[in-house]
Amino acid sequence: KRDLENNPKVRLGRIIFPAVVFHGVYDFSVVWLNYMARRTGNYVNDDDRMSFSTEEGSEKISSVVSAAILVAGLCYFSKESRKQRQRLAALDGEFAVMESSLS
Protein backbone atom coordinates (compact mmCIF):
# COMPACT_ATOMS: atom_id res chain seq x y z
CA LYS A 1 0.00 0.00 0.00
CA ARG A 2 2.83 2.37 0.82
CA ASP A 3 4.72 1.78 -2.42
CA LEU A 4 1.90 1.28 -4.93
CA GLU A 5 -0.57 3.83 -3.60
CA ASN A 6 2.03 6.33 -2.35
CA ASN A 7 0.58 6.30 1.16
CA PRO A 8 3.35 7.40 3.55
CA LYS A 9 1.23 6.65 6.62
CA VAL A 10 1.72 2.91 6.20
CA ARG A 11 4.82 1.79 8.05
CA LEU A 12 6.10 -1.46 9.47
CA GLY A 13 4.17 -1.14 12.73
CA ARG A 14 0.87 -0.69 10.93
CA ILE A 15 1.59 -3.73 8.77
CA ILE A 16 2.46 -6.19 11.53
CA PHE A 17 0.12 -4.85 14.26
CA PRO A 18 -2.90 -7.01 13.30
CA ALA A 19 -0.77 -10.15 13.22
CA VAL A 20 0.80 -9.40 16.60
CA VAL A 21 -2.59 -8.70 18.17
CA PHE A 22 -4.16 -11.80 16.61
CA HIS A 23 -1.37 -14.13 17.75
CA GLY A 24 -1.13 -12.48 21.16
CA VAL A 25 -4.85 -12.83 21.86
CA TYR A 26 -4.84 -16.42 20.63
CA ASP A 27 -1.79 -17.44 22.66
CA PHE A 28 -3.04 -15.67 25.78
CA SER A 29 -6.47 -17.28 25.56
CA VAL A 30 -5.03 -20.77 25.07
CA VAL A 31 -2.65 -20.39 28.02
CA TRP A 32 -5.32 -18.79 30.21
CA LEU A 33 -7.85 -21.53 29.42
CA ASN A 34 -5.22 -24.17 30.18
CA TYR A 35 -4.53 -22.49 33.52
CA MET A 36 -8.23 -22.31 34.34
CA ALA A 37 -8.71 -25.96 33.44
CA ARG A 38 -5.78 -27.13 35.56
CA ARG A 39 -6.78 -25.26 38.70
CA THR A 40 -7.34 -27.61 41.59
CA GLY A 41 -10.60 -26.75 43.14
CA ASN A 42 -13.67 -28.71 44.00
CA TYR A 43 -16.91 -26.96 44.57
CA VAL A 44 -19.93 -28.37 46.33
CA ASN A 45 -23.37 -27.95 44.88
CA ASP A 46 -25.67 -26.96 47.76
CA ASP A 47 -28.71 -28.83 46.42
CA ASP A 48 -27.46 -32.39 46.28
CA ARG A 49 -23.99 -32.19 47.85
CA MET A 50 -22.30 -33.36 44.67
CA SER A 51 -18.82 -32.03 44.12
CA PHE A 52 -17.55 -31.28 40.68
CA SER A 53 -14.21 -30.23 39.35
CA THR A 54 -13.32 -27.15 37.31
CA GLU A 55 -12.07 -29.39 34.48
CA GLU A 56 -15.56 -30.28 33.27
CA GLY A 57 -16.11 -28.84 29.81
CA SER A 58 -12.82 -26.96 29.70
CA GLU A 59 -11.78 -28.74 26.51
CA LYS A 60 -15.01 -27.71 24.83
CA ILE A 61 -14.60 -24.12 25.96
CA SER A 62 -11.01 -24.08 24.73
CA SER A 63 -12.07 -25.41 21.35
CA VAL A 64 -14.89 -22.89 21.03
CA VAL A 65 -12.66 -19.96 21.97
CA SER A 66 -9.94 -21.12 19.58
CA ALA A 67 -12.46 -21.52 16.76
CA ALA A 68 -13.97 -18.09 17.49
CA ILE A 69 -10.55 -16.42 17.34
CA LEU A 70 -9.77 -18.28 14.12
CA VAL A 71 -13.06 -17.21 12.53
CA ALA A 72 -12.46 -13.59 13.61
CA GLY A 73 -9.01 -13.70 12.00
CA LEU A 74 -10.42 -15.15 8.78
CA CYS A 75 -13.14 -12.48 8.67
CA TYR A 76 -10.56 -9.74 9.16
CA PHE A 77 -8.34 -11.25 6.45
CA SER A 78 -11.17 -11.57 3.94
CA LYS A 79 -12.34 -7.99 4.61
CA GLU A 80 -8.86 -6.54 4.20
CA SER A 81 -8.05 -8.63 1.11
CA ARG A 82 -11.32 -7.55 -0.52
CA LYS A 83 -10.45 -3.91 0.11
CA GLN A 84 -6.96 -4.49 -1.29
CA ARG A 85 -8.32 -6.15 -4.44
CA GLN A 86 -10.63 -3.17 -4.99
CA ARG A 87 -7.76 -0.71 -4.54
CA LEU A 88 -5.54 -2.67 -6.93
CA ALA A 89 -8.33 -2.90 -9.52
CA ALA A 90 -8.77 0.87 -9.29
CA LEU A 91 -5.02 1.35 -9.75
CA ASP A 92 -5.06 -0.97 -12.77
CA GLY A 93 -7.93 1.04 -14.23
CA GLU A 94 -6.07 4.30 -13.70
CA PHE A 95 -2.94 2.83 -15.26
CA ALA A 96 -4.89 1.62 -18.29
CA VAL A 97 -6.42 5.07 -18.76
CA MET A 98 -3.01 6.73 -18.48
CA GLU A 99 -1.50 4.24 -20.91
CA SER A 100 -4.27 4.72 -23.48
CA SER A 101 -3.98 8.51 -23.30
CA LEU A 102 -0.25 8.30 -24.00
CA SER A 103 -0.73 6.17 -27.11
Image (cartoon, grey):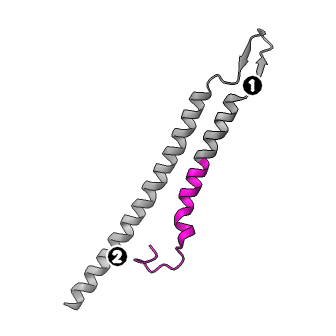
Q: Which of 62 and 89 is in front in this view?
A: 62
Label 1, secondary structure: give it. Answer: loop
Residue at 74% across, 11% down: 50
Q: Amino acid type of disc 1?
A: Thr
How many residues crowd around disc 1 within 10 Å: few (fewer than 14), some, or many (20 or more)?
A: few
| Rendering coords of residue 47 (x, y %) | 78, 11
Q: Amino acid type of disc 2?
A: Leu
Query: Which residue position is annotated with label 2?
Result: 91
Q: Give the range drawn in magenta.
A: 1-25
Label 2, secondary structure: give it. Answer: helix
Q: In this view, does 94 lie to the left or right of 24?
A: left
Residue at the farthest bottom position: 102
Residue at 39% across, 70% down: 87
| Rendering coords of residue 82 (x, y %) | 40, 60
How many residues crowd around disc 2 within 10 Å: few (fewer than 14), some, or many (20 or more)?
A: some
Disc 1 + disc 2, Cβ < 8 Å: no
Residue at 67% across, 39% down: 32
Residue at the farthest right position: 46
Q: Note whether 95 is above or below 45 in the view shown.
A: below
Indicate the quadrant where residue 77 lies.
bottom left
Q: Of marks 1 and 2, which one's residue comes earlier in the chain?
A: 1
Q: Nearer the viewer, residue 36 or 4?
A: 36
Query: Which residue position is annotated with label 1?
Result: 40
Residue 8 covered by magenta stretch:
yes
Q: Which of 78 and 56 is in front in this view?
A: 56
Q: In which quarter of the image is the N terminus?
A: bottom left
Q: Note whether 99 is above or below 9 in the view shown.
A: below
Residue at 54% across, 73% down: 11
